[in-house]
Image (cartoon, helix red, strand yellow):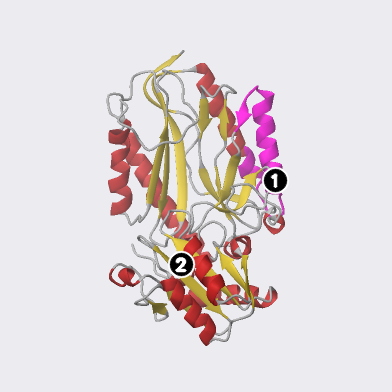
Amino acid sequence: MIITLEQTEREQRLQAVRDVVREKNYKGMLFVADSYLGKKGSLRYLFDNHLIHRYGFGLVLPDDQYQILPSGLHWCTDRRVPDTLFPSDHEVMEVVRRLKEHGVTTGVVGVVGLNNTMKIEDFRYLTQELPEIEWVDASVTFDEIRSIKSKPEIEGIKEANRIIEASFDAIIEHIKSGLTEEEAVSVAYSTAHALGAKDTLYLTLSSEQAGAVEPYFLNPRPKVIKDGDYLIVSLEITGPSGHWVEHSRMFCFGQRDEEMEKLAGLVAKGIQYAEVTMKPGVKVTDIQEQVEKMAQVEGYHCGHLTGHGIGMDVIERPFVARQTNTAFVGVEVPGKDDEELLYLKEGMVISFHPQIMRTDKQKSAYMSDVFVITEDGAERLSSRNHEVILIGGETIR
């Protein structure tokens, strides 16, 4: 199934950006994208370009827009729109040419990705060639725009969730002790891509000790799964529309561990709390605080990021985490500029994934679900329960 961007949807997104240009008194907005999984969503959002590798720019002006890509991507771009340019010299030089062509040589230009994506040599060239422009980071402003998903976007997210659930079902049918983590998860790759997934990020958490999981996310390893082991599998994919979803559950092989089951129960409690609490107007930092209290009452520690917005980048604002006064936009906690994104709104999509652990980090639990914030509350896209999936016997250690 291929979902492409309808012209009306694209026009609405571009108009939303232009509205911000006008409200902020910008001369335009420059979008910096990199094929790294968390830094390329802006080009998909604006130009329907699923950036396969390298990097690129999007330039939105009051009366025009351009996608500006390295010349080599002329041969390696899966979406084409009439306003895509492939300059023969360098893409940042084309940005300067287009700004000058439109008379943008002074004033303020908002840059999405200025402080955490743009290459230093590109920024130096911009400031050298256009010294009277003030370049300001507009990443948080852009997250305010894209945090509210349209109906077609939510349809794309639900399609991606159907794909990720089918991929997880394939793991459940296939997994057993004696396989390596790599072998156990491998069936999810083929299932997801056969159903239309584009990007995949698969992670596992485990331990060398039976009946335990350390709280560290790693690629699936050649580590053999043994009876008595616990394993957490976390799948993240983009569906055909370019939207990310996440799905994670816990496995136990043969023998249940009482403390691991308790930790898993606390994670489930946190997700269930979110399901009934996440409504328009609710403050995300309050949700983080409550999940931390649930963990602390039982003598455990909660991970720093209990949830976050998700869309065409795998991690978007809002951040369900404790607020800080940091000015770094690339940090996954609400900073001083996040005030507008501290409160849930209808149309937001949240990946919620409490991580609860012992203070010595020898045992931990983690699961994730995706929620759509509706007028009435939170719609959980998965119907799968949060019990640890038992592969084998029933003994509790």
In the image, residue 74 sits, relative to residue 210, either above or below, namely below
Q: Is residue 193 above or below residue 368?
A: below
Q: Amino acid at mark 2?
A: Leu
Residue 152 visible in this rendered orientation of the protein:
no
The disc labelled 1 sits on which kind of residue?
Gln
- Give residue 315's position: percent from left, percent from top: 52, 51
User: Which of the pair 9/119 is nearer the observer?
Assistant: 119
Mark 2 is surrounded, within 10 Å at the Cα level, by few (under 14), some (14 to 19) or many (20 or more) other residues, namely many
Q: Tell me what residue is drawn at x 31 percent, y 46 percent.
A: 189
Asked which secondary structure carries label 2, the reply is: helix
Q: Secondary structure at mark 1?
A: loop
Question: Which sits earlier in the primary sequence, circle 1 or circle 2?
Answer: 2
**Which residue position holds label 2?**
43
Graded by Cα atoms within 10 Å as few (under 14), some (14 to 19) or many (20 or more), the crowding at tag 1 reads some
Q: Is residue 47 left or right of residue 185?
A: right
Q: Nearer the viewer, residue 354 or 136?
A: 136
| Residue marked by disc 1 | 323
